[in-house]
Amino acid sequence: MALEDTIIQLKGMGKKFKTANGPVVALDDINLDIRRGEIFGIIGLSGAGKSTLVRCINMLEVPTSGEVLFEGQDLTSMSEAGRRKARQSMGMIFQQFNLLAQRNILKNICFPMEISGERRYSRTEARDRAMELLKLVGLEDRAGAYPAQLSGGQKQRVAIARAIATNPKVLLCDEATSALDPNTTKSILQLLKQINRDFGITVIVITHEMSVIESICDRVAIIDKSHIAEVGRVSDIFSEPKSKIGRQLILGDAVTNVAFDNSRKIRIIFDGRESMEPVIANMILASKVPVNILYASTRDVGGKAMGQMIIQLPEDADSAGRALHYLDTVKIPYEEVTGDDI
Ligand code: ADP
């Protein structure tokens, strides 16, 4: 579907909580445009502010500064009635499913239609629509079951059916697959993708798992310590994360606590005395310092390496020193490379 316009816009949005220990800044100066019809991911570590962000989008939490525009209208300056109406255009699903335990699943799905202020549904109408949705999520034969009788994946399917029962424009998913095993996660993500594609519902996915973003999102915002660290197309951010937190989430801890931006580069000369791979691997193991290999032109000659390799050392002088110390100890020749001269 065409991604033509902005459906949700956050402008300088912030949220502070008052606590007994003083104010907690959960979000600060958040600026985001979410486009109609896209699957937008928001990823960050625990405590980064993801849940607060998604709850501010539908006004379950009221931001303490900035604006939340939904289809061009600022929800922060609306009456509670206006916000409630806007909230009905935004379905939501949660990690813990939040189904009504005392109602069977057909009645769980009918529930939002019973309380809908937007459009009145007769009982038969609500029932027919609920059955249609159960079919869509593959549970038409479980209409009379109670939530406790279902698996986690089935409960999330019911929650999805319930969330889209009143034809919302947006579906907010707060860690919706975090309580599920990998296979069930996959099938729920496929269902979200199908709903996005078939009904054009904009989907916003909050997660701490990069694999979730990778499998269904068009664009992603990385959030770190209450701020947006970077936003972009998933393919761009995955191939070249620019923020430290982006590198950490995508590449893993080993590479990342380390800054390489303004660091020294060295050329290692392989003259046939050493085999190539153990030199670099042993250097990393002995010095506990990760390096970037920028360029390698080496040939394996009877198990020995000939040629050269340019590696980039971490910015931090101690770490760089440890890596070089290893090369000195094992008497591998190297020279400093300056600028872009490789
Ligand atoms: P995430 O979803 O990324 O784990 P949250 O949005 O839940 O992060 O929390 C962000 C920050 O805001 C955390 O420091 C958290 O302790 C704080 N926070 C969230 N909700 C409340 C609340 N109702 N009262 C006080 N602090 C809160």
Image: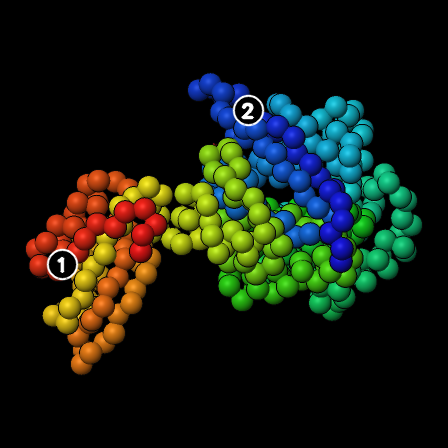
- Circle 2 sits on which residue? 16
Q: Tell me the residue at 23%/68% (across/down).
A: 307
Let me know if residue 144 appears in the view: no
Question: How many C-alpha atoms fall within 10 Å of the one at disc 1: few (<14), some, or many (≥20)?
Answer: few
Give above or below for 240 relative to 84: below
Q: Tell me the residue at 67%/60% (across/down).
A: 193
| Quadrant for the N terminus in the image | bottom right
Expressed as whole percent of the image width and height from the top left, the position of residue 239 reads 48, 56
The three-letter amino acid code for the residue at tag 2 is: Lys
Q: Quadrant of residue 158?
A: bottom right
Q: Nearer the viewer, residue 64 or 310?
A: 310
The colouring scheme, among rainbow, by chain, secondary structure or one colour, is rainbow
- Residue 306 falls left or right of residue 26: left
| Quadrant for the C terminus in the image | bottom left
CA–CA distance between discs 1 and 2? 55 Å
Q: Nearer the viewer, residue 119 or 13?
A: 13
- Residue 262 falls left or right of residue 155: left
Q: Tell me the residue at 27%/55% (across/down).
A: 311
Expressed as whole percent of the image width and height from the top left, the position of residue 62 reads 65, 27
Which is closer to the viewer, label 1 or label 2?
A: 1
- The earlier-in-sequence mark between 1 and 2 is 2
Disc 1 within 8 angstroms of ligand 1 (CB): no
- Circle 1 sits on which residue? 333
- Residue 147 falls left or right of residue 161: left
